[in-house]
């Protein structure tokens, strides 16, 4: 069973990867949270094309942390995914380390509903670092400013945020059509026995590009 790592475990395991493969992986501090916790970026590869993967965009969604560690190991093991593709993978270990720390009461398991909801924490809308209620120029949270600075520095050709859900199935939100995404998603979901969410609440009235694949509407 997948075990969700804590903020400290994420940092330790990422540091171990960088120490083991110093030529291919680098770990650096890119920001500081409101409570003074470090925000760290693990970069794998030396390609000219930048990918930015953001884990922990919401405090109660720890699956992203486990995913970026697995992704780093996969990319380190297969040079075709980095040098062969001319790609550098930039993995932000956690966008909201303060909120994630407040969920650590249920992260080690056992994964029961009672344990989860007794220790559950999710900040209010304006304290979620990925949201920009007042626009990028007025971003108030240091975590948000860190993410925006990374986007300006890296200019990624691909950025994805690793969200999670308590119930229901998987789905993908895209900023534009990505041909082939729907059949690939369906294949992966079938292989891993993951249900697909064909009408998630987050995407009500959004254009569907295929089963469980939706396009984010442009801002008004």
Image (spheres, rainbow, N blue to C red):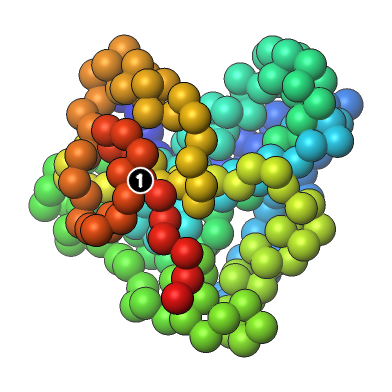
Query: Is residue 78 visible to us here?
Result: yes
Query: Of residues 210 and 41, which is closer to you in this image?
Result: 210
Q: Is residue 79 above or below residue 95?
A: above
Q: Is residue 158 left or right of residue 63?
A: right
SS for callout 1: strand
Query: Of residues 107 and 151, which is closer to you in this image?
Result: 151
Q: Residue furthest left?
A: 114
Number of residues whose C-alpha sits closer than 10 Å to that of mark 1, classed few (under 14), some (14–19) or many (20 or more): many
Relative image position of residue 27 (x, y in whole percent)? 76, 44
Query: Is residue 20 visible to us here?
Result: no
Residue ID at (73%, 59%): 150
Task: Locate the N terminus and report the quarter of the image it occupies.
Answer: top left
Relative image position of residue 184 (x, y in whole percent)? 41, 21
Q: Is residue 75 above or below residue 114?
A: above
Relative image position of residue 41 (x, y in whole percent)? 70, 49
What number of labels is visible?
A: 1
Residue ID at (19%, 46%): 199
Q: Is residue 1 above or below residue 92?
A: above
Query: Of residues 132 and 27, which is closer to you in this image?
Result: 132
Q: Is residue 162 left or right of residue 105?
A: right
Q: Quadrant of residue 42?
A: top right
Task: Locate the C terminus and report the quarter of the image it occupies.
Answer: bottom left
Relative image position of residue 161 (x, y in whole percent)? 50, 49
* Residue located beneath label 1 in the image: 214
Residue ID at (64%, 43%): 158
């Amino acid at each position: 069973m997948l075990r969700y790592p804590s903020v400290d475990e994420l940092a330790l395991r990422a540091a171990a990867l960088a120490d083991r493969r110093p030529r291919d992986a680098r770990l650096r501090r890119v920001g500081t949270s409101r409570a003074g916790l470090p925000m760290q970026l693990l970069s794998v590869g030396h390609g000219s094309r930048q990918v930015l993967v953001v884990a922990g965009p919401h405090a109660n969604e720890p699956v992203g942390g486990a995913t970026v560690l697995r992704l780093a190991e996969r990319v380190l093991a297969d040079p075709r995914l980095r040098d062969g593709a001319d790609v550098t993978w930039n993995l932000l270990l956690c966008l909201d380390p303060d909120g994630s720390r407040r969920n650590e009461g249920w992260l080690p398991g056992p994964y029961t509903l009672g344990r989860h909801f007794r220790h559950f924490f999710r900040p209010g809308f304006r304290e979620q670092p990925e949201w920009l209620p007042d626009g990028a120029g007025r971003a108030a949270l240091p975590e948000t400013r860190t993410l925006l600075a990374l986007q300006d520095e890296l200019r990624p050709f691909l950025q994805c945020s690793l969200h999670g859900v308590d119930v229901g199935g998987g789905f993908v939100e895209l900023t534009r059509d990505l041909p082939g995404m729907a059949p690939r998603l369906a294949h992966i979901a079938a292989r891993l026995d993951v249900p697909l969410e064909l009408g998630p609440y987050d995407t009500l009235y959004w254009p569907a590009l295929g089963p469980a694949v939706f396009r984010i509407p442009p801002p008004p």
